[in-house]
Image (spheres, rainbow, N blue to C red):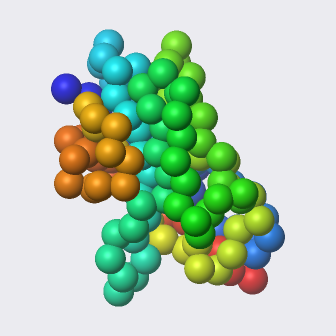
Amino acid sequence: QVQLVESGGGLVQPGGSLRLSCAGSGRTFSSYTIGWFRQAPGKEREFVVAISSVGGRTYYADSVNGRFTISRDNSKNVVYLQMNSLKPEDTAVYYCAASTTWTPTTATLYQYWGQGTQVTVSA
């Protein structure tokens, strides 16, 4: 079992940057695929990006490809999401989630979820 805690959200102007962190507990954190999802008000949750257990594979949604970068440090049980060139449409609650499989975009296959962190992009 793993517990996840997101941090790093906040208010940023368009074009700005934020780095989100997803801290995991437990000795098996490094064995999980970690994904980031987001949900804006009135919209369904959507996939953002995922990274495989040892970091060899990543998969990005088209909407963030080239602007967001995911990485992980298994020695610290942390996954990072560097978000650059932020747009107002990136405003959402961002969740990290853990999965025992590599099916990055399928939310129902993630077994563990964090509580979320708010990202607001506004002038």
Number of marks in picture: 0
- Provide residue 6's location: percent of width, then percent of height: 45, 45
Q: Is residue 10 visible?
A: no
Residue at 52% across / 34% down in the picture? 57
Residue at 25% across / 45% down in the picture? 110
- Provide residue 46's location: percent of width, then percent of height: 39, 67
Residue projecting furthest to the bottom: 42
Where residue 10 sits, quadrant-wise, is bottom right
6 w.r.t. 30: above or below: below
- Provide residue 24's location: percent of width, then percent of height: 38, 29
Residue at 52% across / 13% down in the picture? 75
Q: Is residue 36 left or right of residue 114?
A: right
Residue at 59% across / 42% down in the picture? 70
Q: Is residue 39 left or right of residue 68?
A: left
Q: Is residue 27 visible?
A: yes
90 w.r.t. 74: above or below: below
Q: Is residue 107 left or right of residue 61?
A: left
Q: Nearer the viewer, residue 108 or 77?
A: 108
- Provide residue 11's location: percent of width, then percent of height: 64, 68
The C terminus: image quadrant = bottom right
92 w.r.t. 41: above or below: above
Residue projecting furthest to the right: 15
Q: Nearer the viewer, residue 116 or 29?
A: 29
The N terminus: image quadrant = top left
